[in-house]
Every structure is written in C-alpha cells, then in structure tokens.
Amino acid sequence: MINQDATLTLYTEKYQEILNSLFQGGCFIYSPSVKTIEQALDGASYSVTYFPNLDDRNLDTVCIRKISK
C-alpha cells in the first residue's frame, strides 16, 4: 500500500474478495488498518471500528463488519 506499486491492485482485489465472502454480521479483523481503503467502503454495507494501538497509531487494529448483503 505504501509503495503504490503493481501489488496494490492485487491487494485491493483480495481485500474486496474477503469482504464479499463475509456473511451478514460477519467480521474481518486485521492489523494494521488501511485507512485509504477503509474510508472508501460503502457505509450502507460495512461498518468500520478501530482499536487504537497506543504505542503506534500506524498499527491500529480494525474490524470491518458486513451489515447488508
């Protein structure tokens, strides 16, 4: 994500594939957060909750919950 190289497309596609595989109410929890992608998510389909890492905010954990089909 930082380098904006060719793997960015692959990463984004895989990320979306994971989210699409969630059942309604299902969660994807990971760290570190990827705010550029998380901010682009459809708020009607997904909720985003951050769990801050107090030592390094670049390492926040995030929970994406699918709220609609």
Image: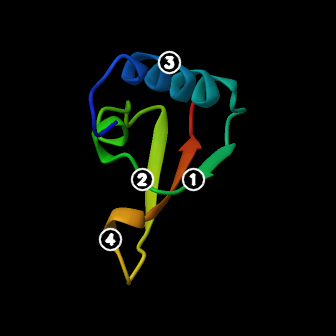
Alpha-carbon span between mark 3 and mark 1: 16 Å
Q: Is residue 34 above or below residue 13?
A: below
Quadrant housing residue 17: top right
The amino acid type, in three-letter code, at marker 1 is Tyr
Secondary structure found at label 4: helix
Mark 3 Cα shell of 10 Å, populated few (<14), some (14-19), many (≥20)? few
Check disc 1 and report the residue beneath it.
30
Secondary structure found at label 2: loop
In this rendered view, identify the residue nearer to me: 41 or 69: 41
Secondary structure found at label 1: strand
> Residue 47: x and y, percent?
46, 46
Relative to 22, is 46 on the left or the right?
left
**Residues under numbered marks 1 and 2 in contact, where contact means CB atoms less than 8 Å apart:** yes
In this rendered view, identify the residue nearer to me: 34 or 68: 34
Name the N-terminal-most of marks 2 and 3: 3
In this rendered view, identify the residue nearer to me: 3 or 58: 3
Q: Residue at x 57, y 31 (%)?
A: 68
Name the N-terminal-most of marks 4 and 3: 3
Alpha-carbon span between mark 4 and mark 2: 9 Å
Check disc 2 and report the residue beneath it.
33
Check disc 3 and report the residue beneath it.
13
In this rendered view, identify the residue nearer to me: 46 or 58: 58
Quadrant housing residue 44: top left
Asked if residue 69 shows in the view, the reply is no
> Residue 33: x and y, percent?
42, 53
Alpha-carbon span between mark 4 and mark 1: 14 Å
Name the N-terminal-most of marks 4 and 2: 2
**Residues under numbered marks 2 and 3 in contact, where contact means CB atoms less than 8 Å apart:** no
Asked if residue 24 shows in the view, the reply is yes
**Residues under numbered marks 4 and 2 in contact, where contact means CB atoms less than 8 Å apart:** no
Q: How is the image coloured?
A: rainbow
Q: Is residue 30 above or below residue 14?
A: below
